[in-house]
Image: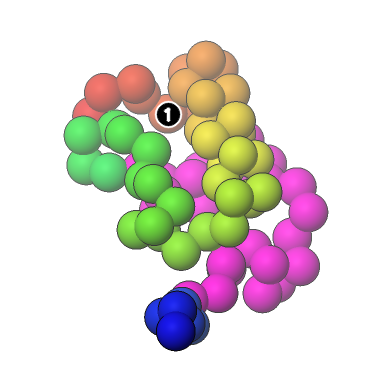
Amino acid sequence: MAAIDNKQCPFCKEKIKYIDYKNLKVLNSFITSFGKILPKYYSGVCLKHQKLLARSIKRARNMCLIPFIK
């Protein structure tokens, strides 16, 4: 019998299809204090949104909106 994970993706819950790289408040909540992207098993984000989130964070870093290292 497999364990049931009750965590639901916060982006799926609000039916968000696109994660904007300019929304720094959302992006900073998924970055550690060292500047690393949180893995999906800590953040509770589904795989589809984790990939979108990582892409948005990397875009924000390249646009100098978020530092690479804090």
Q: Which residues are magenta?
A: 7-31
In this view, the residue in front, 64 or 38, is 38
Look at 42% across and 29% down and name the residue there. Answer: 66
Magenta stretch encompasses residue 29: yes
Amino acid type, residue under disc 1 in the picture: Ile
Q: Residues within 10 Å of mark 1 (few under 14, many from 20)?
A: many
Q: Residue 14 location, x and y as percent?
A: 70, 72
Main SS of the magenta part reads: loop
Q: Residue 49 location, x and y as percent?
A: 63, 50
Which corner quadrant of the image does residue 13 belong to?
A: bottom right
Look at 60% across and 39% down and name the residue there. Answer: 51
Q: Residue 43 location, x and y as percent?
A: 41, 59
Residue occupied by mark 1:
66
Magenta stretch encompasses residue 14: yes
Q: Residue 50 location, x and y as percent?
A: 56, 46
Q: Which quadrant of the figure contains the C terminus?
A: top left
Q: Is residue 50 above or below residue 8?
A: above
State left or right for residue 27 relative to residue 16.
Answer: left
Q: Is residue 13 above or below residue 19?
A: below
In this view, the residue in front, 70 or 56, is 56
Q: Secondary structure at mark 1?
A: loop
